[in-house]
Amino acid sequence: MKKLVLVLALAFGTSINAQKTGFEDFSESDGFDISKGFDVQLFQKYLTQEMYVAFPWMIEDTTNNYAAKAVSQEEAGDPMCFGTKGGGMVNHEKDELSEAKRIVKEYVEYLYNSPNFGGEKTIKKYYVDFSAVATKQYGGLIRYGLIVDNNITRESLSGISEISEIE
């Protein structure tokens, strides 16, 4: 009988606590709702949207997503576009839109200020597409990868194709 009373009291207490916390306001001052968590798909959408804003002349090329997701150039298969990769971990304590804006802004500054890519004029003239991905990792971590591509291949630089090397 004592066990039954204890179990009922515990169940009743848990039920009241669950109902009470369902009405609490978990939002912080910046508008992020902790109770809903960080939405990776929404972040992916905002990341792509911000890349369109930053590079309005470019188109999204999802065929480069494999390279944007890769952690190393070797893992990506050594593509030419990997040199422009920017990536890292997402701060999932911020909201999805502000985090996407921050990341793309930092990436644009990196590209335009790096001597390796020829500056803003060169990027606007030669780079034609981009890839932006967000991937969920173990333990709730979220990684992002950004790439812009000028579609130059090793074959176009050397003038030799793989087919002509075989023949």
Image (cartoon, rainbow, N blue to C red):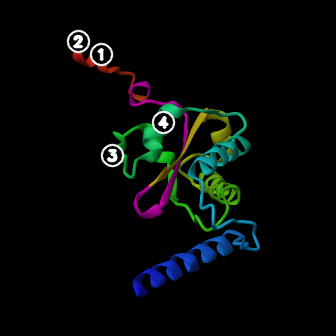
Is residue 128 in the magenta section?
no
Q: Which of these two is toward me, 97 or 88?
A: 97
What residue is pinned by disc 1? 163
> Measured from the top left, where is residue 11 in percent x and y?
52, 75
Of callouts 3 and 2, which one flags the residue occurring earlier in the amino acid sequence? 3
Mark 3–mark 2 distance (CA, rounded to whole Å) = 29 Å
* In the image: residue 143, left or right of residue 129: left
The answer to whether marks 2 and 1 mark residues whose Cβ atoms lie closer than 8 Å is yes
Q: In the rendered image, which quarter is residue 82 located in? A: top left
SS assignment at label 3: helix
Mark 3–mark 4 distance (CA, rounded to whole Å) = 13 Å
Front: mark 3 or 2: 3
Residue type pointed to by label 3: Glu
Front: mark 1 or 3: 3
- The circle on residue 75 is 3
- The circle on residue 112 is none
The answer to whether marks 4 and 2 mark residues whose Cβ atoms lie closer than 8 Å is no
Mark 4–mark 2 distance (CA, rounded to whole Å) = 29 Å
Residue type pointed to by label 4: Asn
Front: mark 4 or 1: 4
Residue type pointed to by label 2: Glu
Q: In the rendered image, which quarter is residue 61 located in? A: top right
Q: Residue at x 50, y 80 (%)?
A: 10
What residue is pinned by disc 4? 64
Q: Residue at x 58, y 65 (%)?
A: 91
> Measured from the top left, where is residue 153 in percent x and y?
43, 30
Of callouts 1 and 3, which one flags the residue occurring earlier in the amino acid sequence? 3
Q: Residue at x 70, y 59 (%)?
A: 98
